[in-house]
Image (cartoon, helix red, strand yellow):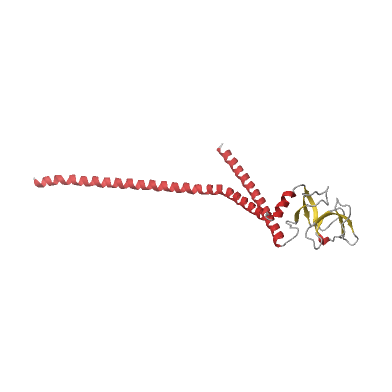
Amino acid sequence: MEQAKTKKEKTIDIIKKVAWGILLAVFGFVAVTLVWLGIDKFIVKSPVPKAWGCATLTVVTGSMQGTIDVGDVIVIKKTNDYKLHDIVTYIIPGDKVPTTHRIWKINPDGTYITKGDANNTEDTTQITKDMIVGEVVKVIPNAGHFVNWLRMEGWLFVVSLLAIIGIGTLLIKANTAPEQATNTTPAKTDEAANSDGNTAEDSAKAENQTQTESNASNCDKDKNTDQKPQKKDDDA
């Protein structure tokens, strides 16, 4: 029964370690991503910060209404092949704000004509491939309202990074504390055992010393007893 309980505890410990490892890996990935985005945004000054080849943008106008609504978050990814009817995000030279429209036509020279799904007319600027930031690969409905507010405030990356570091530190401490307690317990036990052994050894030495002193005292008494009759004989 005891052996089965030990195996169960070992299995639980393994599961806990695996779970902690996964959590720490996730927090590490998020922290690295935030640092990467922060460098691309605040140091490189990229209009569309990217990490791991992808970027997220919040839609703030209704030119793609019905397909992509205001407040939606889009995930874009850079590719080398853009086809008719792909939804792409591009930046016209001189502009700082990216535009996300659908490829409406492809010209013989390889340039693109775009159009918003909710617009009645095509865009006037012909788009070249080097203007395209990426293709829309995912739309997350209504996820952009809160994210957009944080980005406008400008402290999204700092607060998020500090939160990730703080939570990660707490997780590491919580994971390592039980192991340290387990490792220090045997040392304390050994120290106590050595202390008990030293105490027993000291007691044995004291007892031997007492017995020696007692034997020496008895010998002195015997000598004195033997000497007294001799004095009487001399007097006689």
Quadrant (top left, top right, bottom left, bottom right) of the N terminus:
top right
Image position, residue 54 (x, y; %): 75, 55
Image position, residue 174 (x, y; %): 58, 48
Dividing the picture into quarters, in which one does residue 89 lie? bottom right
| Number of marks in picture | 0
Q: Could you say which is closer to the camera, residue 186 or residue 172? A: 172
For the view shown, which residue lies furthest in the right direction?
108
Q: Residue at x 69, y 58 (%)?
A: 38
Q: Residue at x 63, y 48 (%)?
A: 20
Q: Residue at x 36, y 48 (%)?
A: 202
Image position, residue 122 (x, y; %): 88, 55
Q: Could you say which is closer to the camera, residue 37 or residue 77? A: 37
Instruction: Using residue 91 as the reference point, say whether residue 177 is left or right of it.
Output: left
Q: Could you say which is closer to the camera, residue 187 or residue 108? A: 108
Image position, residue 103 (x, y; %): 86, 55
For the view shown, which residue lies furthest in the left direction?
236
Instruction: Using residue 42 as the reference point, say whether residue 106 is left or right of it.
Output: right
Instruction: Using residue 126 as the reference point, say whether residue 150 is left or right of it.
Output: left
Q: Could you say which is closer to the camera, residue 15 or residue 56? A: 56
Q: Residue at x 45, y 49 (%)?
A: 191
Instruction: Using residue 48 as the reference point, say whether residue 222 is left or right of it.
Output: left
Quadrant (top left, top right, bottom left, bottom right) of the C terminus:
top left
